[in-house]
Image (cartoon, coloured by chain):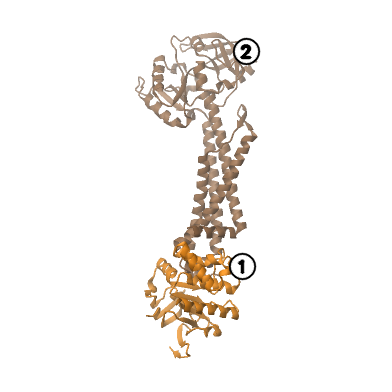
Chain colours: A orange, B brown
Amino acid sequence: MSLIVAQNLSKTYAQGEIRVEALKGLDFNIEPASFVSFVGPSGSGKTTLLNLIGCLDKPTSGTLSVADTDVSHLDRRMAASFRGERIGFIFQDFNLIPVLTAYENVEYPLLVVQNTPSSERRRRVLALLDAVGMAEQKNKYPDQISGGQKQRVAIARALVADPKLVLADEPTANLDHETAYMVIDVMKRMKTELGTTFVFSTHDQKIVGEAETIYTLEDGVLSGREVKNNNVQSM
Amino acid sequence: MFSLCKIALRNLVRQKRRTLLTASLITIGVVFVVVFVSVSGSFKNMMVGQITDSFLGHIQIHKKGYVRSLDSLPLTLNMNSKAVKKVEEALNETPGIETYSARLKFGGMFSNFVETTNVRLNGVYPENEFRTVPLFPARIREGEKAIKKGDVLLPELLAKGMKVKVGDTVVVVATNRDGSVNGKQFRVSGILESATGPGGRDGYVHIEDAREILRMDEMEISEIAIRLKDFAKLQEVFGMVGDRLSEQLNKQGQPAFEIHTWEKLSPFYNIARMIDIMTLFVKLMLIAIVLISIMNVMIMAVYERIREIGTIAAIGTAPGKILSMFLVEGFSLGVFGALVGNVIGVAIVYSLGIAKLTFDFGRQKGLLLSPTIDLTDILVISLIVIAISALASLQPAFKASRMEPIKALRHV
């Protein structure tokens, strides 16, 4: 059973009388515990697609199912609840809460979103900080750690609520190559250890190669799908 | 909730200078209101106490129509002994009344054998009068603190004008209700300090002397001044006495008596009302200060943290929790300002009490200002500040909670 199923998925933005078709009738499936990348030039619709999958936006037409839930019609509150329980987010700019320590940032989804009991919270936060190699930096604030360390904390935060899916929009764009590889490596390791599906967008060709499945987007249309064994399919 | 408070408080600390400035503004506002409420309230209470306890009493009862003609002190509107008895019965049955004093008021001519002038006099039973207006003896600046038969207490302005001293003999001439004139010699036993308001510049004699000079066959009374056990129950007791006396009708079928609280008899009541209105305006200013400063800070906070709001919304924070987070921030600023402001305000009030400030009011000199502040006032001021802080945060907090995460995340 696919984790994500998109059928004829479209998104059109209206700016006054101008209508911009960001996504045009996409059809794709993403399987559980996969490591998927969407690539394409700026404006190709990668971020729009991730926003739709992440329930941050609604499609104009077509259907989108994530973890067996039709997310096209979720209202604001239900979407927030769904995101909190099923989806983790990793942002290009890390987006850690500056007034919280690394530990508290990771703890935030369990504390504020899921109301997890204290002992369970502590166990899961420490385990994830350890897994991403940030256990020793747990009491540091975001402005006291490097970009790579911030992104590792962000990965731990995205995974702490045990989501089925983690979405990462250009997670390595603000990192140097070495750190970017390190971050991708952490993501892959987490995917293997926890069985979480990672879907990320990037335009970095070297990073793209790390994905198991690569979808290419051009002008809002899926133009290609490549799997790890270099099997390129035209769509 | 604890985590929301923690984030809110840390965000306040994050903007130290701005938080400090806003909290200082609220603190200064609270200090100003606490000191103003304390000083003006103490001034008002002291003046009311001076007026009611030195000559007016808390409540007065007259025959219907007397107060309207108070300036001419009409003997024809005195209460006869039968009427006085009915009033006394009503007063004795009413709980909350500590004591009362019957007065026979009249106007006459006063002579020092060289000059003659007008005088307004009160004939009183000294013991009752002193119990009803306990500050009265303090108004006797020179001479004995008593009113004996054959003695007169003169208001100081009259005594000065007529060059009369304690121990001098004077003559009082008065016209009785039939129009015949009678005179009587008195010894000046004391000089009375003037007080503000009606009756504040009257002289006093023993009521038996008043009856004699007015040639009354039976005792008549112009007014009965009442002292309450608890001044705070003024309106309650006033209502009870009024109800009891309303049963007494005159020949025209109208109420035979009229009853007034001090508020209706003293012009100081209007000053007291002005003080209350000023206090209200000062509180409104505080509300405006808190409203504008908190709203300004919270709008800034929301604007600065749009991406942060987008992030926490994206990772699943419910809109209600985002709203609470910003409400707690504004609320905390209000609590801090109210707390520090009250502490400083109470310290200033306490210091003013130690400094023993005096002031003059009318002809009353050297009145000691003893500012105090009630716990109720502190609670009311604190509640106003805290409630307005939360209210001022509501709009920015609501805006934050309604923000689309996708737009917020794109914000630069």
Disc 1: CA contacts within 10 A as few (<14), some (14-19) or many (>=20):
few
Placement of B332 over or under A234, stated as above or below: above
Percent position (x, y) of residue A154?
A: 53, 71
Q: In the image shown, does B374 or B265 lie closer to the viewer?
A: B374
Q: Nearer the viewer, mark 1 or mark 2?
A: 1
Look at 39% across and 23% down and name the residue there: B93
Up-down: is B66 above or below B358?
above
Name the residue rendered at 43%, 27% in the picture. B96
Q: Residue at x 63, y 38 (%)?
A: B351
Question: Disc 2 is attached to a residue of which chain?
Answer: B
Q: Are marks 1 and 2 on the same chain?
A: no
Q: CA distance from mark 1 to mark 2?
A: 96 Å
Residue B115 - label: 2
Disc count in the image? 2
**Mark 1: amino acid:** Gln
> Residue B386 location, x and y as percent?
51, 50
- Observer-nearest residue: B61 or B163? B61
Q: Secondary structure at mark 1?
A: helix
Asked if residue B243 is positioned above or below residue B323 in the image, the reply reads above
Q: Quadrant of residue A143?
A: bottom right
Q: Amino acid at mark 2?
A: Glu
Which residue was labeled with disc 1? A144
Whole-percent x and y of residue B262? 49, 28
